[in-house]
């Protein structure tokens, strides 16, 4: 690039600026677009955000549909469907809300189930805003005697 300093450093030629180039801006743009691949042209038209959203939608819906099929067919549908919702939750707020609601149902079910089985503490802490389930009354189980039978330990020393 020519600057006025170049003239003082021995360069006596002034740069030639062509105000009307043979290839106009439109021709240069067409040449640039012709050199792009089909994927680059799609990125220019659609944008990377839309392509990301489309890819996440396709992958997430596919995983959810496979999980729904696994309800009838053998497979871990209870794991695959939340994974698909988590993938969809990367782009969609409705999927995040549905996943949060589903998690609340699972947590409540685990808490209620552990209370029915008589476990003192639930496996999962109760979700915020809900009251924890109280364990069953211990006085009902006092009539049972604990099993204190011990087997004789036979150890031999050489």
Image (cartoon, helix red, strand yellow):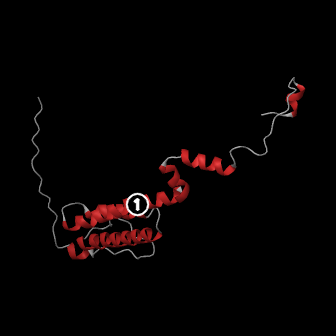
Residue at point 33%, 62% (across, down): 62
Given residues 153 and 54, the one toward you in this image is 54
* Relative side of 93 to 11, left or right: left
Instruction: Name which quarter of the figure residue 155 lies in.
Output: top left
Of all residues shown, which one is farthest toward the right?
Answer: 8
Residue under numbered circle 1:
87
Instruction: Name which quarter of the figure residue 58 lies in.
Output: bottom left
**Res. 3 visible in picture:** yes
**Res. 123 visible in picture:** no
Instruction: Name which quarter of the figure residue 15 lies in.
Output: top right
* Relative side of 138 to 104, left or right: left
* Mark 1 neighbour density, 10 Å: few (under 14) some (14–19) many (20 or more): many
Residue at point 38%, 74% (across, down): 132
Residue at point 81%, 36% (across, down): 16
SS state under label 1: helix
On the rendered image, what quadrant is the C terminus found in?
top left
Residue at point 30%, 61% (across, down): 80
Residue 97 placement (x, y as % from top left): 44, 71
Of all residues shown, which one is farthest toward the top?
Answer: 10
* Relative side of 110 to 16, left or right: left
Of all residues shown, which one is farthest toward the front?
Answer: 22
Residue 111 placement (x, y as % from top left): 32, 71
Residue 150 placement (x, y as % from top left): 12, 53
């Amino acid at each position: 690039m020519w600057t006025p300093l170049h003239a003082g450093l021995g360069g006596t030629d002034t740069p030639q600026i062509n105000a009307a180039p043979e290839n106009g801006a439109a021709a240069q743009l067409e040449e640039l677009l012709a050199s792009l691949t089909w994927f680059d042209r799609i990125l220019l038209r659609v944008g990377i955000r839309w392509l990301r959203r489309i890819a996440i939608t396709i992958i997430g819906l596919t995983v959810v549909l496979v999980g729904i099929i696994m309800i009838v067919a053998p497979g871990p549908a209870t794991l695959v469907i939340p994974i698909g919702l988590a993938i969809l939750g990367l782009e969609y707020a409705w999927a995040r809300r549905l996943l949060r609601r589903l998690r609340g149902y699972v947590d409540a079910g685990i808490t209620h189930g552990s209370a029915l089985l008589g476990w003192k503490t639930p496996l999962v802490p109760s979700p915020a805003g809900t009251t924890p389930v109280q364990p069953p009354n211990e006085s009902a189980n006092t009539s049972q005697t604990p099993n204190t039978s011990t087997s004789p330990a036979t150890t031999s020393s050489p």
